[in-house]
Image: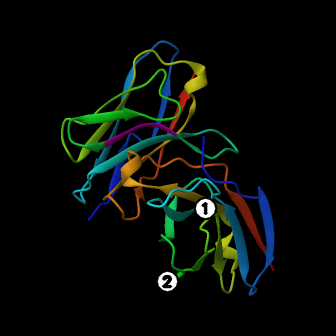
Amino acid sequence: DAKTTQPPSMDCAEGRAANLPCNHSTISGNEYVYWYRQIHSQGPQYIIHGLKNNETNEMASLIITEDRKSSTLILPHATLRDTAVYYCIVRSPYNNNDMRFGAGTRLTVKP
Amino acid sequence: NAGVTQTPKFRVLKTGQSMTLLCAQDMNHEYMYWYRQDPGMGLRLIHYSVGEGTTAKGEVPDGYNVSRLKKQNFLLGLESAAPSQTSVYFCASSYEYTEAFFGQGTRLTVV
């Protein structure tokens, strides 16, 4: 089973920040949090990952709580092209490095 | 630089037929993965490999076999296809702690 829990769907207004939550309460100390998204039926696309510090790149920001049991992906200025299914996963090379996806959150950006 | 290439992109099989899906990556990645995605659902891990000559079972391995004879290739085999294996299959590859890159998928229909 996936080790993460995400809301099934969310809406966001175009131009606003989209905040996507993820619960990973059983995360272990050596597991990273990764975020991917899947647009239509394309292959998933990597967005960002982190261990315990907050991370930012050109696509998004990742906020990880101090206890590491949850995180939030932030798309600062959502556009219509950000409409996709967003997946949060945890992964560790010390756990055979398998990557298991849950159902994800379907984000719909509305004009 | 092709990234991750899946062959074929589409295939229709009759029940009981066999086939092999090929995943090829040119990034010298150690880790490779096979997933299936059914309509409206997330990705489910079938098998994965942490290096040449090694394979491991994922969440839904039954009915599938895999081989990793060369580092750059990961083969997924269906020995006797069933309608329940109708799905979109995705392959991915990565280094140990880095992001995974996905192929564009193989749409398989078993009639």
Q: What colour scheme governs how the chains and residues are painted in the rendered image of this protein?
A: rainbow
Q: Give yes or no for residue B27 being in the magenta stretch.
A: no
Where residue B40 appears, as percent x and y from the top left, is: 70, 45
Q: Residues within 10 Å of mark 1 (few under 14, many from 20)?
A: some
Which numbered disc covers residue A39? 1
Disc 2: which residue:
A57
The amino acid type, in three-letter code, at marker 1 is: Ile
The prevailing secondary structure element of the residues shown in magenta is strand
Where residue B78 appears, as percent x and y from the top left, is: 42, 23
Q: Is residue B29 left or right of residue A26?
A: left
Where residue B56 appears, as percent x and y from the top left, is: 36, 34
The amino acid type, in three-letter code, at marker 2 is: Asn
Looking at the image, is B99 positioned above or below residue B51? below
Q: Residue at x 61, y 53 (%)?
A: A26
Name of the residue lying farthest toward the left: B70
Name of the residue lying farthest toward the top: B16
Where residue B106 appears, as percent x and y from the top left, is: 47, 41
Q: Residue at x 42, y 52 (%)?
A: B103
Q: Is residue B92 visible?
A: no
- Inter-mark Cα distance, 2 to 1: 19 Å
Looking at the image, is A50 positioned above or below residue B17? below
In the image, the segment drawn in magenta is B45-49
Q: Is residue A32 left or right of residue A38?
A: left
Q: Residues within 10 Å of mark 2 (few under 14, many from 20)?
A: few
Which numbered disc covers residue A23? none
Q: Secondary structure at mark 1?
A: loop
Q: Residue at x 21, y 35 (%)?
A: B53
